[in-house]
Image (tube, helix red, strand yellow):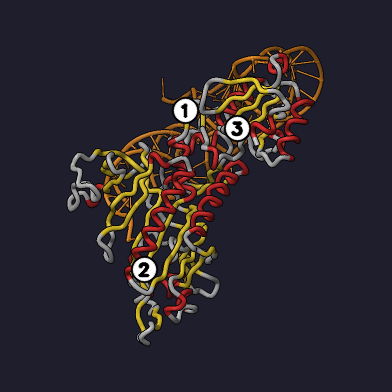
Amino acid sequence: MKQSQLFTRTIKELPKDETSFNAQALIRAGFVDKSAAGVYSFLPLGWKVVNKIKDIIREEMEAIDGQEINMPSLAPKENWQATGRWDTLDVLFKTAGSDEKEYALNPTHEEVVTPLAKKFIYSYRELPLMVFQIQNKFRNEKRAKSGLLRGREFLMKDLYSFHANQEDLDTYYDRAIVAYNNIFQRFGLGDKTYLTYASGGSFAKYSHEFQTLTEAGEDIIYICESCKMAVNKEIIADQDSCPKCGNKDLKEVKAVETGNIFKLGTKYSEPFDLKYQDKDGEKKLVIMGCYGLGISRSLGTIVEVCHDEKGIIWPEEVAPFKIHLLSLNENEIADKIYLDLKSQGVEVLYDDRDASAGEKFADADLIGCPYRLVVSKKSLQAGGLELKKRSESVSRIISSDAIVSELK
RNA sequence: CGGGGUGUGGCCCAGUUGGUCUAAGGCGUCUGGUUUGGGACCAGAAGAUCGAGAGUUCGAAUCUCUCCACCCCGACCA
């Protein structure tokens, strides 16, 4: 992508109506635009990151036998009345159609996926079944805050699993934990993300959250450093030690809930009467699990965790582009390198603008691609191009012949 | 939802004891020229219902009332 053609530009000054780092950096660097409190557009750079995140999630969900689907954002009022949540869930956006039929803008999809599953699950032979989607969710938060960390419309992956019995759910749940760990590892958040015991609501003793350590988070958790588990403050009263090793020396930290997985049991199969016929011929309630992961929230979290005073430092797997190629008045040579890299499938953002060196360097730091490649008189005299990692301060010269093989 | 704060060209802002405000400056944009290793310089240009509505007044960005939006703290967060 040529930066001269890129939709949106970087801005020098901090947006005055944002104080969270993720929102400031993402707006300044041109990744997102805010249209209302907690409602953001993703611009080309931001959407590229979203798609990297989606690809990772998709791979890991398919690896645990999830099948991707897409459910509607609108759900008829009756679905939400069936579980009683039409009246009790205060974050539910409600809207009316022209026929005065009322709908919910789905904040989660148990009320949609359960009746959907009912249409296709009849026998134990169809279980287990796992479906997931990556979709916009709507929650009418009393107060949207912290940039992308708490929005009213946001991107989320939600997977739902259907099982014949509790043991099968338990086994699958553990596989999901492994998949989630892989995902956060690939996001570059592995070291900072803790599997955390949290409230299970009315239907299970505990749920598990994936909490990523950052001061920008609004949750308080207690971490056990020896086994990398944590306990959410909300349940610390009944769980004052590490649930895994019994360690009582827990450390209080702030974190953001990037994922949350639940054993739903029959909470939703009951109201929708989702049953299957077992080997013995008996009709039994399907046992369910749900597994959420905030995509836009993860994006914001990555920015909170991976940055310095100059800007974002994208982990390689989620970076909008691998390389930021800067031409300092050497567009002829840079054009060629750009085309070479592109033809080899290397993702390059090429700063071909007629801008000063200082502006290009500042933008490269702000946007935060993992590698910066500079073509200038100076670099050519030194024997090629200057290559620098965004995360490091040292640079080195590589010959133009070696670039493609080095960076592919 | 309670408390606090802020709304002035696309962005950041000055101006608010009412009076050359016919709204200043910086960034960005456009034109011309000079520049090019850490957000360059010169000259010129375009761009504003001063958040909205109502009111007070000879006169309102400035005062009053109502409303709206955004940010922060708190509460809330299957």
Viewer-proximal residue among A342 and B62: A342
Check disc 3 and report its element: helix, strand or loop.
loop
Residue A10, which numbered label?
A: 3
> In the image, which is nearer the foreground, mark 1 or mark 2?
2
Q: Bin the neighbour count of mark 3 within 10 Å (Cα to Cα): few under 14, some 14-19, many 20 and up.
A: some
| Label 3 – label 2 distance at C-alpha | 50 Å
> In the image, which is nearer the foreground, mark 3 or mark 1?
1
Q: Which residue is drawn at 42% across and 78% down?
A: A124
Q: Residue at x 54, y 38 (%)?
A: A316
Q: Do the residues marked 1 and 2 share a common chain? A: yes
Which amino acid is tagged 3? Thr
Viewer-proximal residue among A222 and B39: A222
Whether A281 is drawn above or below B29: the answer is below
Q: Which of marks 3 and 2 is nearer the N terminus?
A: 3
Q: Which chain carries label 2?
A: A
Kindly tell me whether residue A41 is visible in this rendering: no
Check disc 2 and report its element: helix, strand or loop.
helix
Residue behind mark 2: A168
For the N terminus of chain A, the quadrant is: top right
Which amino acid is tagged 1? Asp
Q: Mark 3 lies on which chain?
A: A
Residue behind mark 1: A308
Which amino acid is tagged 2? Asp
> In the image, which is nearer the foreground, mark 3 or mark 2?
2
In the rendered image, residue B77, in percent from the top left (x then y), is placed at 33, 55
Query: Relative to residue A135, is residue A178 drawn left or right?
Result: left
Q: Do the residues marked 3 and 2 share a common chain? A: yes
Whether A355 is drawn above or below A231: the answer is above
Callout 1 touching callout 2 (CB < 8 Å): no
